[in-house]
Image (cartoon, grey):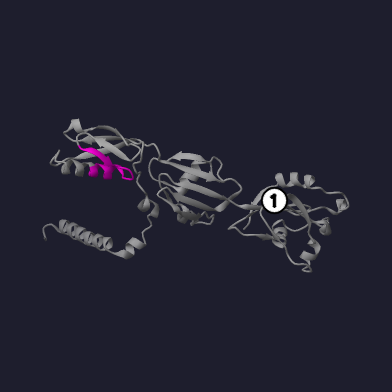
């Protein structure tokens, strides 16, 4: 070794590196601290379903090869071997199933099969709710939830935080995902989407505060929560000095139509009257003192609510 010191050093370094890699590969701590996103590990390969067109290649046996359409029962008709169920299998799994069937039928002793899906008929994902372009989107290859929402043009201003994913194979076990806006929250919410899934983006309730306030607008109700009059006024940056607090009104939609309810806003702000809970679609109107004696109708308030800016509740 004295004649080849450089070579000895290289061999020793390589041996140490290989030993370290082997230790890391068997260590659960390293796997738990991996920074690789879970999306790649949980991606679901595309499954074959009725109507798909398969290209089946049996090596060295062209008579058994060909393009086969999956029937309504999820089967393909193999030459000489008969029907084989391939529904809910991946292309690779179906190739192994064909090899096993050819072997059992003693048609080939050691078959080797390659299956390619030429046409997917039912591999779309249905995206509904508060997205700009709802519809059915093809899913050719692994995609995440945010990929599909982006393809649909993103959320509407009225979108809530809750997204429900219903897998085709598990219709009674929907998965609820909360879409957050804080740094790092997208990694947890960016879940894997399977072919045939239905994605429903929830609608966030809106409470409108219009009239003589600092920041009139619509405020989204998050996490199925509610706003009270006090908190809604705080979000609207409070009443202006010219507001007629004793003339405030609450316009609410019910089964019989719209109704106007008086709101003792001055007493609520001074803690002399109980606070009131607002519901989705409520309009809290605070007129100005200059027009406090004027007749204010629902029709005169609705345009202000319709054109109001929408704000997310912090």
The answer to whether residue 307 of the structure is visible from this angle is: no
Q: Residue furthest right?
A: 293
40 lies above or below 83: below
Q: Circle 1 is placed at which residue position? A: 255
**Label 1: element kind:** loop
Q: Residue at x 49, y 56 (%)?
A: 185
The answer to whether residue 162 of the structure is visible from this angle is: yes
Percent position of residue 194, x then y: 40, 47
Q: Split into 4 quadrants, where in the image is the C terminus?
A: bottom right
Q: Residue at x 48, y 39 (%)?
A: 136
Percent position of residue 307, x then y: 71, 44
Q: Residue furthest bottom?
A: 272
104 lies above or below 173: above
Percent position of residue 34, x then y: 36, 59
Q: Residue at x 25, y 63 (%)?
A: 23
Which stretch is magenta? 81-97
Tell me: 54 left or right of 137.
left
26 lies above or below 91: below
Percent position of residue 179, x then y: 52, 54
Q: Is residue 238 magenta?
A: no
Tell me: 55 left or right of 216.
left
Q: Which of the two residues, 78 or 135, is positioned nearer the viewer here?
A: 78
The quarter holding residue 240 reads bottom right
The quarter holding residue 229 reads bottom right
């Amino acid at each position: 070794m004295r004649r080849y010191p450089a070579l000895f050093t290289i061999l020793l370094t390589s041996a140490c590196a290989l030993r370290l890699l082997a230790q890391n590969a068997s260590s659960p701590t390293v796997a738990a601290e991996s920074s690789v996103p879970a999306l790649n590990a949980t991606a679901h390969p595309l499954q074959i379903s009725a109507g798909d067109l398969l290209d089946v290649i049996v090596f060295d046996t062209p008579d058994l090869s060909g393009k086969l359409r999956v029937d309504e029962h999820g089967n393909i008709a193999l030459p000489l071997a008969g029907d084989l169920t391939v529904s809910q299998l991946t292309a690779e799994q179906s190739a192994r199933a064909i090899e096993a069937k050819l072997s059992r039928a003693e048609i080939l002793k050691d078959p080797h099969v390659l299956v390619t899906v030429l046409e997917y008929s039912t591999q779309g994902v249905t995206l509904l709710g508060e997205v700009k372009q709802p519809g059915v989107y093809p899913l050719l290859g692994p995609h995440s939830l945010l990929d599909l929402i982006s393809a649909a043009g993103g959320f509407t201003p009225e979108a809530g935080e809750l997204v429900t994913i219903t897998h085709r194979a598990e219709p009674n076990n929907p998965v609820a995902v909360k879409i957050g806006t804080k740094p790092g929250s997208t990694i947890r919410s960016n879940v894997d989407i399977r072919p045939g899934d239905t994605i429903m983006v929830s609608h966030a309730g809106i409470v409108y505060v219009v009239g003589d306030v600092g920041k009139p607008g619509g405020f989204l109700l998050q996490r199925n929560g509610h706003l009270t009059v006090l908190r809604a006024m705080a979000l609207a940056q409070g009443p202006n000095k010219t507001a007629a607090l004793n003339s405030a009104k609450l316009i609410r939609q019910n089964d019989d139509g719209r109704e106007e309810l008086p709101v003792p806003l001055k007493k609520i702000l001074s803690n002399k009257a109980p606070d009131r809970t607002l519901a989705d679609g409520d309009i809290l109107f605070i007129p100005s003192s200059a027009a406090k004696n004027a007749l204010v109708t629902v029709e005169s308030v609705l345009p202000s609510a319709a054109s109001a800016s929408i704000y997310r509740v912090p």
